[in-house]
Amino acid sequence: MKSEIQINNKAGNCRIEIEGTIGVPEEWQFDDPADRVATYERFRDAVRRIAEIEAPEVVVEIRSTGGDVNDALLIHDALRSLGARITTRCYGYTASAATIIAQAASEGRREISANALYLIHDSVCAAEGNASELEGKIALLRQTDARIAAVYAARSGRPAAEFEALMAENNGNGRWLSPAEAVEAGLADRVTDAAPHAAPTLAQNLSRGWERLLAGLGLRPGEATAAGRNALPADRNVLHAVPDDGPRRRAAAEAMRRRFRATETLPCEDPSYGDAVQSANARAYAEDAKCFRG
């Protein structure tokens, strides 16, 4: 799978797509440099762009079986720092580190597709070294498991021990959960129907186009009418001109006319159509002839 982070901004709604492995260095996975990985470094740029446009709605679509826990935690925290209402949607096999990102949703906004499967498990690493070094790795793994369980517990309101037990099933490999089981376990808030949505109407498309235009101008829908003095009458729209306020506008226009003059076209000397235009050689010969005559 091509692994990457993409942003699609539509007026006040931003959609972020996270696909493939999270945080694993690209040279470890792909020969083609065009294949990308959902690393926090790339996601940080995405979050910066979202924060700049101040999108009130952010939808994060997750299609990933996991990856690096550190990057997943950083992405989770970056999403939680946004002032927007965040919805996370999980599709396909959502597992491991990807489930951490899914917990970044706002209250009641963790969604899972009816066709998805969900897996949480104990953290894993590759290690080598002496006994002391391996003991240090074991301690780090246990701390990581406790940190991940705390993230799940914070979003579900349930004890972290419940999630530690679920992660430890099958010798730490966890157990694949159906969407209903994920909701029951407190890992998701609701199951979404995978059926296609109806195509938007012409009126909806026009409304979205208008919202995109306002977003491009740095405005939000309804912002211009928030103050009573800026509100438009019901029979008017923004294309109506402001009525002429009389003498003051005419005086201002006259002052502008006095201040700025129209560009003048100055006369220039061009040869008439009847005069022959001499070449450089002809002019040189004429000058020589004057010298001989003199």
Image (tube, rainbow, N blue to C red):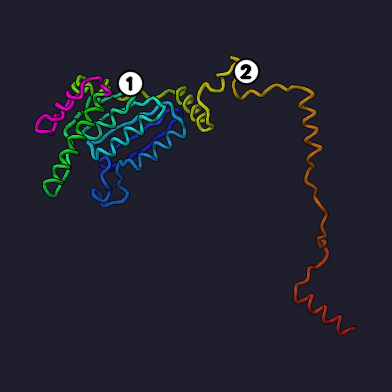
Residue 77: image tag = none
Q: Which one is closest to the eye, mark 1 or mark 2?
A: 1
Residue most toward the top? 234
User: In x, y percent, where is residue 177?
Assistant: 17, 26
User: In x, y percent, where is residue 245?
Assistant: 74, 22
- Please give the residue where the numbered disc 1 appears in the rendered image: 107
What residue is shown at x 17% (from left), y 35% (from top)? 142
**Local crowd size for mark 1, using a 10 Å CA cut-off: few (<14), some (14–19), many (≥20):** few
What residue is shown at x 27% (from left), y 20% (from top)? 189
User: In x, y percent, where is residue 223?
Assistant: 53, 22
261 lies above or below 107: below
Instruction: Decide which of 134, 283 is in the foreground and name it.
Output: 134
Residue 241 placement: quadrant: top right
User: In x, y percent, where is residue 46?
Assistant: 39, 38
**Label 1 to label 2, Cα distance in Å?**
36 Å
Q: Describe residue 4's horizontal placement relative to residue 245 as left or right.
A: left
Determine if the magenta segment contains residue 167: yes
Tell me where the magenta segment starts and ends, as one range.
Answer: 154-178
Q: Are marks 1 and 2 in contact (CB under 8 Å)?
A: no
Residue 229: image tag = 2
Residue most toward the right? 294
Residue 235 in view here: no
Instruction: Decide which of 110, 69 is in the foreground and name it.
Output: 69
**Local crowd size for mark 2, using a 10 Å CA cut-off: few (<14), some (14–19), many (≥20):** few
Query: How many marks are shown on the rendered structure?
Result: 2
Instruction: Decide which of 9, 181 is in the foreground and name it.
Output: 181
